[in-house]
Amino acid sequence: MKVEAKALKYGDNINTDIIIPGKYLVIMDEEELGRHAMEGIDPVFSGKSRDGIVLVVGDNFGSGSSREQAPIALKNANVKCIVAKSFARIFYRNAINLGLPVLECSDLWSEVIEGDILTVSLEDGLIENGRIRRTFKAQPLPPFILDIIQSGGLLNKLKQSLK
Amino acid sequence: MNIVEKILSKASGEKEVTPGQIVDAKIDYAMINEITGYLVAKYFKDVGAKKVWDKERVTIILDHTIPAPTAQAAEVHRIVRDFARDLDIPGFYDVGRGGVCHQVMVEKGYVKPGEVIVGADSHTVTYGALGAFSTGIGSTEMTSVFITGRLWFKVPKVIRIDVAGEFDRFVGAKDLFLRVAKEIGFSGATYMGLEFTGPTVKNMSVSSRLTLCNMAIEVGAKSGIVEPDEKTVEYVKSRTSDPFTPLNGDSDAEYDRTLNINVDGLPSQIACPGAVDNVKPVSELGDVELDQIYIGSCTNGRIEDLQAAADILRGRQVNPRTRLVVVPASQEIFIDAMNKGLIQTFAEAGAAIATASCGACYGGHLGVLAAGETCLSTTNRNFIGRMGDPKAKVYLGSPTVAAASALTGRITDPNTLR
Ligand code: SF4
């Protein structure tokens, strides 16, 4: 499974209140949630991400609450993959369960500028930055996690198992 | 094995487990609130499920947006209420019946030592105070738990926090945790467990241990836990007649590391705006004027907290330059506070008192902040934008500091009150 898209880059410690502020938690329309993604740090994020992006972020991405509205908002803002230096635990699991690919890589961040085209290969965790012609290695995902992402999320797997 | 490993080994039927190992565990209880629960209700239908694995082991608690502040919130309530009714869930707590989900879980006897509990809310870590392994998960995983009653976990490494010494008057669990947060850092325990131990923790009330474990997630931890003792057993027995088997760690249990803290002479601690580990002793803050003081939440909205605050406020007035909002964590606490005369004390002091709920803790309603305002809050998060406008500032502190600060309108050490 390969993802190729432009990079958008932000820093460390982006918590769930930044990704989707509490006042939006009762919004049930997923596309509307997407329009408010990352509003706490970049009010025009969803405009920039419209054509599909790889989100490159620093340490501790997604800390704070268990609100699944955070990865839902990012997914609906057309985030194709998130590469962080590190993730907070609940966000990491939530993203995978929604079929949103997440990779941990500490070297990539400093070598990316907004607009770089990144090619991410999920099976082996390789991320290529075309502009500088360099490839970075992320921790590859364990097979059972890759399986959830490739199925399009845990719900699809549940659906199959209930059939 | 340490207590976390013991519980996970029992729940997964493995003889021995070690950190890093992935186990498939049997879940004893699963909890959702309306914010995470309406997604579970939706997903549950989407996948075509008809019933939960065990309706006695599921709780559904409305707390974040009660009573509904908007039509949209009311719609969310309706979906969750219908879901609870369709599934015939006995553990459903509607507006006015429960309060903050974590407090309800504990006081209604759903939390028992040695068990595994998941909640679709990050502060589910609170229940470790009663010797359970508990952690927060998202709505998709919760849908899976509702159907199967099982979930995978990676066995975490555990940091042991060994606490000695005696708290000064006005100082307690909140100050201890903030001190620990300063040491560990806000992401320093990511994917790990925190075990609180030592004579000071032994001497703590169940209520204080709940405060301590509640905040474990604020340093990224997967769980916070205190080994069960007589106090734990007595508390749980007063809340449920269900049988339970407390588990303790072995004497040769292994830990990632041990952090020693002595609380002798520890002054009240304050987390400054933006991050929970941005902690200073109250005396080093200088003059911080406050627009609002908030006492409540699953961290510090219990009767012990309200009592400590009321003892300072009794017979005095909230400073005219500021405002005080008090929100008991549960309906039971509200009634208790009424019977003890605390609600009257707060009201006479000029506080606004709201029904048991999450209130303004997450910036929802009942005391949300405007741009440029400053608040001292007894809650657990001071992220930018957490309690309202991103340009508002939130300081975190204990109920005694909150009460003293309400009297002066600025962050105040209760020891300096005359
Ligand atoms: S009181 Fe605050 S921290 Fe506790 S569950 Fe409610 S919103 Fe979350």
Image (cartoon, rainbow, N blue to C red):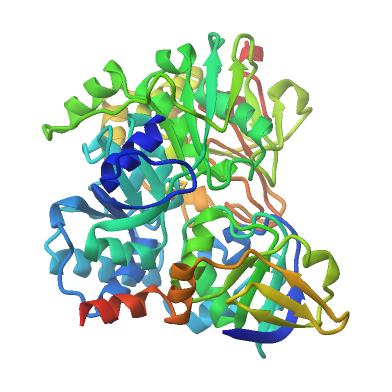
Is any part of residue A17 visible from this angle? yes
On the image, which quarter does residue A36 sit in?
A: bottom right
Give left or right: position of B224 versus B272: left
Q: Residue A86's x, y, as percent? A: 65, 57
Residue at image coords 22%, 28%: B236
Give left or right: position of B84 versus B129: left
Quick check: B38 above or below B287? below
Is any part of residue A27 visible from this angle? no
Residue at image coords 53%, 8%: B166
Give left or right: position of A122 versus B46: right
Quick check: A139 above or below B258? below
Image quadrant where one finds the C terminus of chain B: top right
Residue at image coords 56%, 74%: A101
Toward the right, the furthest residue is A132
Quick check: A25 above or below B257? below
Give left or right: position of B335 versus A24: left
Image quadrant where one finds the N terminus of chain B: top left
Residue at image coords 55%, 78%: A75
Work out whether residue B339 or residue B415 is closer to the camera in this orientation and state it. B415
Work out whether residue B238 or residue B95 is closer to the camera in this orientation and state it. B238
Give the total number of marks visible in the rendering.
0
Quick check: B122 above or below B302? below
Toward the front, the furthest residue is B15
On the image, which quarter does residue A127 sit in?
A: bottom right
Q: Residue B103's x, y, as percent? A: 33, 39
Q: Residue B42's x, y, as percent? A: 31, 75
Q: Residue A76's x, y, as percent? A: 54, 81
